[in-house]
Image: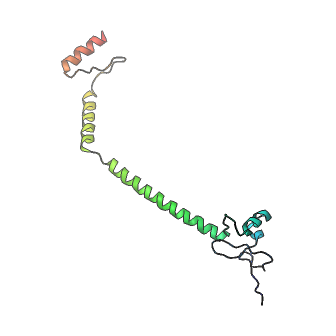
């Protein structure tokens, strides 16, 4: 008694050599998956070094790889979030520098600005005045 093998894609009877998926081992017509005669001959070779996966198994294989990629990307995103949180918290030194900068700006907000006159780097106010006058002469 002969059993009729049916194609897993079109469910028609199987004439000739069986082309089997290397993952699920279900038979499929080469015409149902768009394989050329030369490709079919290679896949029917017993000593072949390449694998053939039907459309369903190929998708499963790709999904497995994508799940792995997603897990890696999630870990990277979590790491970036943690780094961002730690970098966004100002340190005591940063706060002190910021306060000093704001106080300096507040003190200098009433100063008269003259074009092409470089700001004095003197610490003592009287020295700054003398320095400013000499630059303006």
Q: Is residue 94 left or right of residue 83?
A: left
Percent across and percent down for residue 34 are 75, 65
Q: Nearer the viewer, residue 4 or 108?
A: 4
Q: Is residue 121 left or right of residue 5?
A: left
Q: Residue at x 23, y 20 (%)?
A: 122
Q: Residue at x 27, y 34 (%)?
A: 101
Residue 121, located in which quarter of the rendered image?
A: top left
Quadrant in which the C terminus is drawn: top left
Residue drawn where x is 63% and y is 67% of the image = 58
- Look at 52% across and 64% down and name the residue there: 67
Number of callouts: 0
Name the image colouring.
rainbow
Residue 109 coordinates in the image, percent (x, y): 28, 28
Question: Residue 113 in the image: x percent, y percent?
Answer: 32, 21
For this orientation, the residue located farthest to the front is 47
- Looking at the figure, which quarter contains the N terminus? bottom right
From this view, report whether residue 130 is shown above or below residue 44: above
Residue 14 vs 130, above or below: the answer is below
- Judge left or right: residue 51 versus residue 108: right
Q: Position of residue 130 (x, y in %)?
A: 22, 14
Residue nearest the observer in this picture, 115 or 68: 68
Quick check: 11 above or below 60? below
């Amino acid at each position: 008694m002969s059993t009729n093998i049916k194609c897993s894609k079109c469910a028609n009877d199987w004439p000739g050599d069986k082309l089997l998926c290397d993952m699920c081992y279900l038979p499929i017509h080469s015409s149902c998956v768009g394989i050329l005669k030369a490709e079919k001959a290679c896949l029917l070779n017993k000593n072949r070094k390449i694998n053939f996966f039907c459309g369903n198994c190929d998708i499963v294989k790709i999904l497995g790889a994508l799940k792995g990629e997603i897990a890696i990307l999630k870990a990277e995103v979590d790491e970036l979030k943690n780094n961002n949180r730690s970098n966004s918290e100002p340190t005591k030194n940063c706060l002190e520098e910021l306060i000093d900068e704001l106080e300096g700006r507040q003190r200098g907000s009433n100063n008269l600005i003259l074009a092409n006159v470089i700001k004095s780097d003197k610490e003592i106010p009287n020295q700054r005045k003398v320095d400013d006058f000499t630059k303006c002469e």
